[in-house]
Image (spheres, rainbow, N blue to C red):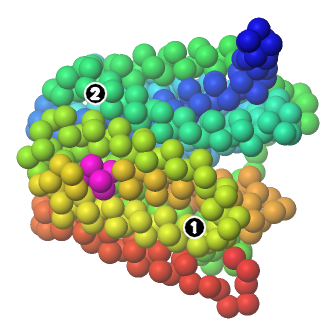
């Protein structure tokens, strides 16, 4: 017994445990809480400020624009200050943005705070791959990365629990609670992740002043399909469709649950079950080895579409809404994890660059989708719009899943 306890204590002090715990905390708050608390509290925000659907959709899109900014800024900051710097900035953005929303006296301040909070996720994702590669022993790296990724599911569960504790109508308190969680995660990160120099060692002053040039694949993701290498076109197209569909679901799932007469507690239950379902994502690597990442990605997108359809059609049934949330959570986390596997397979020479390019393409889809939905809802109603999104997601899954001629992707 004493030997087991000694080994557990040694593991808790190891770089693997410290980095994995810190990364899971920061990613959990940034992705599972700060990024999606707007969707959870959207019905109360609408009532508090008397906002229309178009404005609510615009704010939702703006939060993902903030995510895109963070995503593009993180590599530059890491190149100057080391990989821990973007994670620290991301934690600070979550704290300040959520506090601004919690205290917002007007819709403008609320929107600005939501955008800053949304940028946190863009800052913190990619840098942990570098931290793990430089701090954790090779045999422990898959475990560390899996634990860090699973932080999103834990964050969604924590967000749902926070909403229940603070009360359905206390949306400002919910945002303040996320700010406190972000502050705690940032402190854990500073303690658990060492301050690492930029890759290649300290950067001379002249190089620090020089503006880094964007990579070729990032430029391709921003310039459009014609500039994208053929091997990466399908993963980038998948990223756009996947992020657009999941963003719409996260933004409006709580609203659908409450508007369907399921009560204020339905929205936290939806987010909690998304987090529980997301634990399936831990098996993504095995799925990709058996079926291939293209097939897994297509299946994930198709299941996302089916869950959105179930959410729209079964909005008056608590069982249907909760089942949709559970299935969506599984497809969401598997679809997110397989994107990293797929881009590494099609671009083995530049896996991190290809993955970031896919995230940028996906972020663009996340920016456009809520605006389009917000503009269409007053004309078509939210359930009809969600059904359209579901059909488009399933159609995208069919296109993604088709075997390319003469290619092994």
Residue 309, horizontal then vertical, whole percent: 27, 66
Q: Quadrant of the C terminus?
A: bottom right
- The residue at 45%/20% (across/down) is 181
Viewer-side residue, 142 vs 231:
142
Rendering coords of residue 323 (x, y %):
30, 53
Helix, strand or loop at label 1? It is: helix
Determine crowd level at label 1: few under 14, some 14-19, many 20+ residues with C-alpha closer than 10 A: many
The tag on residue 163 is: 2
- Is 156 a magenta residue? no
Which mark lies nearer to you, 1 or 2?
Answer: 1
Give x and y (percent) for residue 64.
43, 47
Alpha carbon distance from label 1 to label 2: 33 Å
Q: Nearer the viewer, residue 287 or 227?
A: 287
Front residue of 334 and 382: 334
Q: Is residue 119 above or below residue 256?
A: above
Asked if residue 78 can be seen in this view, the reply is no
User: Do the numbered discs 1 and 2 sit on residues whose CB atoms are within 8 Å?
Assistant: no
> Seen in the image, is 118 located left or right of residue 76?
left
Q: Secondary structure at mark 2?
A: helix
- Residue at the (50%, 69%) spot, across then down: 299
Residue highlighted by disc 1? 296
Side of 359 where 353 appears, left or right: right
- Residue at (59% x, 47% y) in the render: 282
The quarter of the picture where residue 388 lies is: bottom left
Q: Main secondary structure of the magenta part?
A: helix
Start and end of the magenta stretch? 321-325
Q: Is residue 119 left or right of residue 212?
A: left
In the rendered view, tell whether residue 367 sits above or below residue 70. below
Residue 85 appears in the picture as rendered: yes
Quadrant assignment for the N terminus: top right
């Amino acid at each position: 017994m004493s030997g087991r306890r000694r080994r557990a204590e040694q593991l808790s002090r190891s770089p693997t445990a410290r980095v994995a715990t810190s990364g899971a905390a920061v990613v959990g708050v940034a992705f599972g809480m700060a990024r999606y608390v707007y969707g959870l509290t959207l019905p109360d925000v609408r009532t508090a400020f008397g906002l229309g659907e178009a404005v609510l959709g615009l704010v939702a899109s703006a939060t993902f624009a903030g995510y895109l900014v963070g995503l593009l800024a993180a590599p530059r900051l890491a190149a100057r200050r080391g990989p821990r710097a973007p994670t620290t900035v991301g934690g600070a953005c979550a704290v300040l943005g959520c506090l601004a929303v919690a205290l917002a006296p007007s819709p403008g301040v609320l929107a600005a705070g939501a955008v800053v909070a949304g940028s946190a996720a863009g800052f913190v994702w990619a840098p942990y791959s570098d931290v793990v590669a430089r701090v954790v022993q090779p045999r422990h790296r898959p475990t560390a990365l899996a634990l860090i990724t699973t932080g999103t599911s834990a964050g969604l569960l924590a967000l749902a629990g926070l909403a229940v504790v603070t009360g359905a109508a206390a949306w400002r308190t919910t945002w303040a609670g996320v700010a406190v969680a972000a502050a705690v995660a940032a402190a854990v990160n500073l303690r658990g992740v060492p301050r690492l120099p930029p890759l290649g060692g300290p950067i001379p002053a002249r190089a620090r002043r020089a503006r880094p040039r964007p990579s070729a694949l990032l430029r391709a993701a921003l310039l459009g399909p014609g500039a994208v290498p053929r091997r990466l076109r399908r993963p980038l197209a998948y990223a756009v469709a996947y992020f657009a569909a999941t963003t719409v679901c996260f933004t409006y799932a709580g609203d659908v649950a409450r508007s369907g007469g399921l009560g204020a507690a339905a929205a936290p239950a939806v987010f909690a079950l998304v987090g529980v379902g997301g634990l399936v994502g831990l098996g993504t690597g095995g799925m990709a080895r058996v079926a291939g990442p293209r097939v897994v990605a297509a299946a994930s997108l198709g299941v996302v579409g089916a869950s959105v359809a179930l959410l729209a059609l079964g909005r008056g049934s608590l069982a249907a809404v909760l089942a949709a949330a559970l299935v969506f959570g599984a497809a969401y986390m598997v679809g997110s994890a397989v994107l990293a596997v797929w881009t590494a397979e099609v671009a083995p020479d530049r896996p991190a660059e290809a993955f970031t390019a896919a995230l940028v393409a996906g972020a663009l889809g996340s920016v456009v989708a809520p605006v389009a939905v917000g503009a269409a809802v007053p004309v078509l109603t939210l359930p009809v719009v969600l059904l359209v999104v579901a059909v488009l997601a399933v159609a995208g899954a069919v296109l993604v899943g088709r075997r390319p001629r003469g290619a092994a992707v």
